[in-house]
Amino acid sequence: MKPEPAKPSAAGSDSEPHNTEHGLPLPEFTGGNELRLLRGGDQLFPAQELAIATARHEVWLATYIFHHDAAGAQLAAKLRAAAQRGVRVRVVVDGFGSKASLSWLHAQFEGSGVALAVFRPIDRWWSWFQPGQLRRLHQKLCVVDGDHAFVGGVNIIDDCTDLNHGPTEQPRLDFSVALRGPLVQQVAQAASAVWTRAWLGRDFGEELLALVRSTEPRARLRNLLQRLRMPRPVHATNQPPQVLPPVCAAFVLRDNLRQRRTIERAYIDAIRSARQRVELVTPYFYPGHAFRRALRDAARRGVQVRLLLQGKVDYRIAGMAAHALYAELLGHGVEVFEYQPAYLHAKICVVDAQWATVGSSNIDPLSLLLNLEANVVVHDAEFAREVAAEFEQAIALSVRVDMQQLGGRGLRAVLRRALVAWVAYVYLRVAGAGGRY
């Protein structure tokens, strides 16, 4: 007798097919990992510095911002010390995010043995006209000896310093994850690949010359391609294998090659499968049609959907973009809160009692369609409880948004939403992002 086909769940009632039907890459889960949630730089930096101080072989560091403040200087000193005792140290920073610190960084690492690469530098005014300049390195990765890894949203900058607004009374809210176990190898491969891409952008001519002069050009070419390759996604089942030992986790990348929508699809699939709750924190919120539909459908089937967004807005257009969606979301039962004590920079989410993610990806077009991003997705009840506890603590310091606060739903609101949609459309087209968002 043939088994009966599985009945579709409520989460799968959306008309848009799931990953497996699209054939899109899916997270590759591994078991036996150790994970520790870290809040802000106050917890991340000491853990990173301790790992770097005990490094024996190599350190990889990738970040959007490496600021010239006390926190940056202390980490730079640890990296120099590691390089001077023979550790291979490779650092890559984004050319836009770290633009103000580049001369300081070069001075910090000159003659130390630290190899500093800049991802898509903007050192001339015409640099803006080069292809791909709107696609930035937004990942925050650190790997030490292939044994310790750190992934999250925290830049190398003091928690009480904002690049646009200066010193702040309260530290920004942000998170990272400290990792040990099988997942570290994937993080190391990603950090190595993005550093190599940035370094080749500087010395591409020398690499080509070395390739031509090599006595084994094919072997050298294979080695080069291996260094450039990000960890490969898989085309597999949407559910992690239940036989994996705890902690079961996946390292999920977004790049502009084979993994353009991997992070977005991981979120959408988790939200579609939700039965009790979806709790999402992000500073920049302007999701596409499929993501918004997943949130609305979850709320309509009785799932508690709570979004924690910026109360203190650092970029006006970003705040306008999120506000343009409030009426739609509230009208479908989604709860929206705005964080009040400080600037919000966290990118975390919890779905039901098992699924959680921490990373660098915002829920907006820049993160979901343009930038290089990295998240850790975790299937573990204890880790999910820890992330949920941080969410509840932040919600207690936030203000709930209701329809009366929106200032009406008339022509002005419609025009504001149309303006945001037009700006997003133009930006994505200039950046070369195609497809429906």
Image: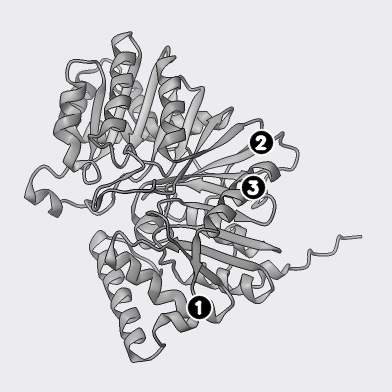
Does residue 14 appear in this view? no
Between residue 254 and residue 276, name the one nearer to us.
276
Sequence-wise first label, 2 or 3: 2
Which x, y percent locates residue 303?
Answer: 67, 68
Q: Do tag 2 and tag 3 residues touch (Cβ < 8 Å)? A: no
Q: Which residue is mark 3?
A: 384
Crowd rating for badge 2 (residues with CA inside 10 Å; few <14, some 14–19, many 20+): many
Circle 1: element type: loop
Q: Amino acid at mark 3?
A: Ala
Q: CA separation, marks 1 and 3?
A: 28 Å
Q: Is residue 166 left or right of residue 402?
A: left
Q: CA separation, marks 2 and 3?
A: 11 Å
Q: Quadrant of residue 339?
A: bottom left
Crowd rating for badge 1 (residues with CA inside 10 Å; few <14, some 14–19, many 20+): some
Q: Which mark is residue 123?
A: none
Q: How many marks?
A: 3
User: Farthest front residue?
Assistant: 169
Q: Which residue is mark 1?
A: 402
Above or below, 203 against 347 in this view is: above
Which x, y percent locates residue 55?
Answer: 42, 15
Which x, y percent locates residue 416?
Answer: 31, 80
Q: Quadrant of residue 113?
A: top left
Q: Is residue 192 left or right of residue 39?
A: left
Q: Which residue is mark 2?
A: 247
Quarter of the image for the C terminus: give it: bottom left
Circle 3: element type: helix
Sequence-wise first label, 2 or 1: 2
Between residue 4 and residue 90, name the one nearer to us.
90
Sequence-wise first label, 1 or 3: 3
